[in-house]
Amino acid sequence: QVQLVESGGGLVQPGGSLRLSCVFSGNFFAYYVMGWYRQAPGKQRELVARITPGSSSDIADSVTGRFTISRDNYGSTVYLHMNSLSPEDTAVYYCNANNLRDGSGYWGQGTQVTVQG
C-alpha cells in the first residue's frame, strides 16, 4: 500500500517562496509518475506539475517560470519549488502518485498554501 505525506505549506506574502515535499511510502517509487495538483475554493482540482521516473517534467502554463518540480529517487520524495507566489496560488496542494505499470493511483491528504499580504 502506498502512502503519500505532504509538508511545507503555510502562509506566505506575495512574491515569496515555498518548497512543498511529498514523501512516498511503499514499494517501487521508481515506477511512479509523481505529480502536484491544487484545488482552490470553489474550483476544480488542477494539475500543477508532474515528473516521470526519469525526471522529465510537465509544468502548467499558469506556473511556468515560477514553479519547478524535482524528485529524489533514493529518498522517495518529490518536491514542488514555488517562487514569486501570488494570491492566485492560494489552494490546497495535493501530491499524486501514478503507477506506470498497473495504472493505480494514490493521493496525499493535501497541504494548504495561502498567499496574502
Image (cartoon, grey):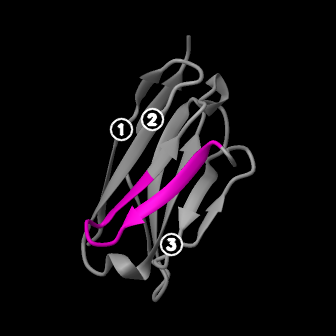
Q: Amino acid at mark 3?
A: Ser
The residue at which mark 3 appears reads as 55
Q: Nearer the viewer, residue 43 or 25?
A: 25
Label 2 sits on a secondary structure element that is strand
Label 3 sits on a secondary structure element that is loop
Residue at 40% x, 39% y is 111
Residue 8 image label:
1
What distance separates the C-alpha of mark 3 from that of mark 2? Answer: 21 Å
Residue at 26% x, 79% y is 27
Q: Earlier in the sequence, mark 3 or mark 1?
A: 1
Q: Amino acid at mark 1?
A: Gly
Q: Amino acid at mark 2?
A: Leu
- Point out residue 17 in the picture as x, y percentages from the top left corner: 49, 32
Q: Earlier in the sequence, mark 1 or mark 2?
A: 1
Q: Residues within 10 Å of mark 3 (few under 14, many from 20)?
A: some
Q: Is residue 68 magenta?
A: yes
Residue 18 image label:
2
What distance separates the C-alpha of mark 3 from that of mark 1? Answer: 21 Å
- Residue 110 shows in this picture: no
Q: Earlier in the sequence, mark 3 or mark 2?
A: 2
Q: Residues within 10 Å of mark 2 (few under 14, many from 20)?
A: some
Count up the numbered dots.
Answer: 3
**Res. 90 image quadrant:** top right
Residue at 35% x, 38% y is 8
Q: In the rendered image of this protein, does residue 109 appear above or below residue 102? A: above
> Would you say the residues marked 1 and 2 are in contact, meaning their CB atoms lie under 8 Å apart?
yes
Extent of the magenta region: 66-79
- Point out residue 47 in the picture as x, y percentages from the top left corner: 62, 54
